[in-house]
């Protein structure tokens, strides 16, 4: 019967929780509510056990005549200590009340700031000062600054804050943070510089040192970049801030352009080299027709002329693949025309022209990405 009554209480409890309409309570979870209830019961049990132990401690000496005189002294000492503790608690109540009021005021302001900046992140509110990335960072910084200021204001109201031990621990903690946080502060400053100067944005195709790829995340301490080979590289902000080349921030109405270089001997007319390079660029479908590719004579070296082909890819994030196809076309056009490419070091004409035999180009892969041999 007792077992059935226990299940009846559980069913009644969960049936009552179904009437809870607060989304916050639903998110909090019934399991957490049960856990807090168990903790409260345990604390109450510990309190009752402690009170029972004190009563037993004062009653035990009064049973024996030899220790009967100790009972009154022990009872007086316990009552005196409890009185001191009670007076300290009563004296701390105003400060605790101030801390509680300050906590709720800070929480209200924090919720308001979170709602405002999250609306900007989700595109519900337009702002001239913030975008989605800066709004997310500003939300975190504003929350940290708000709670830090609240803790500083509430510090004098904490019980025991004026004691030497409390002050000594505070000084020690501040000293440890100041000594060990120099590199962390440098990373934070670099991260804020990247974010608020809008140097990096998720989705940008950039090159930072030897790393080249698409930006996935920009944080206060580090940024993540996905390379064309699907490698996820995490760079500290101090390294990312030293030099960023962005291929996604062209001036409106223009396109990002890349350059590839060939060196050809002086015995080949430059008009012919220009025509072959432009023909190779037009034969590469990944290169845009507007703006048109152009050829520059970058330098007249000791043994050759340095030519630069400037072109705009349709998709800058596929730069390496475009360069690969373009280089194939350059070799095909120059070899078919009988022009030697002696890059990067050309000194003299060999006895026999260094031109490979003509071979048929491999067929393009089908929609499944398989070559004819694989099919």
Image: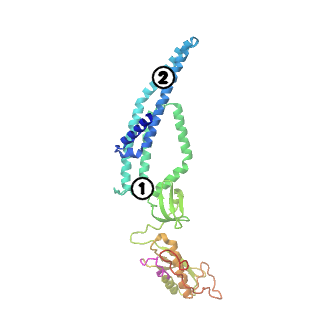
* Image side of residue 320 versus residue 1, left or right: right
Please say whether residue 172 is one of the residues in the magenta stretch: no
Residue labelled with disc 1: 134
Please say whether residue 288 is one of the residues in the magenta stretch: yes
Considering only vertical position in the picture, is 114 above or below 252? Answer: above
Q: Which residues are magenta?
A: 280-290
Q: Residue 277's mark?
A: none
- Quarter containing the N terminus: top left
Determine contact: label 2, label 1, CB under 8 Å. no
The residues tagged by marks 2 and 1 sit, at their Cα atoms, a distance apart of: 54 Å
- Residue 31 can be seen in this image: yes
Q: Position of residue 299 (x, y in %)?
A: 55, 78
* Relative depth, front residue between 332 and 58: 58
Q: Position of residue 127 (x, y in %)?
A: 35, 56
Image point 53% across, 56% down: which residue? 238
Image point 39% across, 40% down: which residue? 11
Q: Residue furthest top?
A: 65
Residue labelled with disc 2: 82
Image point 45% across, 24% down: which residue? 86
Q: Residue furthest right?
A: 351
Image point 45% across, 36% down: which residue? 3
Considering only vertical position in the picture, is 51 above or below 349? Answer: above
């Amino acid at each position: 019967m007792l077992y059935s009554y226990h299940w009846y209480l559980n069913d009644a409890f969960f049936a009552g929780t179904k009437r809870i309409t607060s989304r916050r309570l639903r998110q909090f979870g019934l399991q957490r509510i049960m856990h807090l209830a168990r903790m409260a019961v345990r604390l109450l049990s510990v309190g009752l056990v402690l009170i029972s132990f004190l009563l037993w401690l004062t009653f035990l000496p009064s049973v024996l005549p030899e220790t009967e005189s100790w009972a009154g002294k022990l009872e007086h000492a316990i009552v005196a200590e409890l009185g001191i503790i009670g007076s300290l608690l009563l004296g701390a109540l105003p400060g605790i009340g101030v801390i509680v009021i300050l906590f709720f005021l800070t929480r209200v302001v924090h919720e308001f700031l979170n709602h405002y900046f999250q609306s900007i992140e989700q595109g519900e509110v337009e702002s001239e000062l913030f975008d989605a990335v800066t709004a997310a960072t500003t939300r975190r910084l504003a929350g940290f600054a708000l709670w830090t200021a609240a803790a500083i204001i509430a510090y004098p109201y904490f019980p025991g804050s004026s004691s030497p031990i409390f002050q000594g621990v505070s000084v020690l903690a501040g000293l440890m943070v100041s000594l060990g946080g120099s590199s962390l502060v440098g990373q934070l400053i670099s991260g804020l510089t990247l974010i608020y100067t809008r140097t990096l944005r998720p989705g940008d195709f950039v090159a930072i040192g030897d790393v080249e790829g698409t930006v996935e995340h920009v944080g206060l301490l580090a940024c993540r970049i996905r390379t064309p080979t699907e490698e996820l590289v995490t760079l500290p902000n101090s390294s990312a801030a030293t030099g960023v080349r962005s291929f996604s921030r062209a001036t409106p109405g223009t396109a990002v352009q890349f350059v590839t270089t060939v060196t050809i001997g002086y015995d080949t007319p430059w008009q012919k080299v220009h025509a072959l390079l432009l023909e190779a660029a037009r034969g590469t479908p990944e290169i845009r027709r507007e703006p048109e590719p152009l050829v520059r004579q970058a330098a007249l070296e000791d043994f050759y002329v340095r030519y630069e082909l400037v072109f705009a890819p349709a998709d800058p994030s596929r730069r390496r693949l475009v360069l690969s196809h373009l280089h194939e076309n350059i070799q095909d056009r120059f070899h078919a025309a009988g022009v030697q490419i002696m890059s990067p070091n050309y000194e003299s004409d060999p006895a026999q022209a260094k031109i490979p035999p003509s071979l048929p180009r491999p067929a393009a892969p089908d929609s499944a990405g398989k070559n004819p041999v694989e099919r």
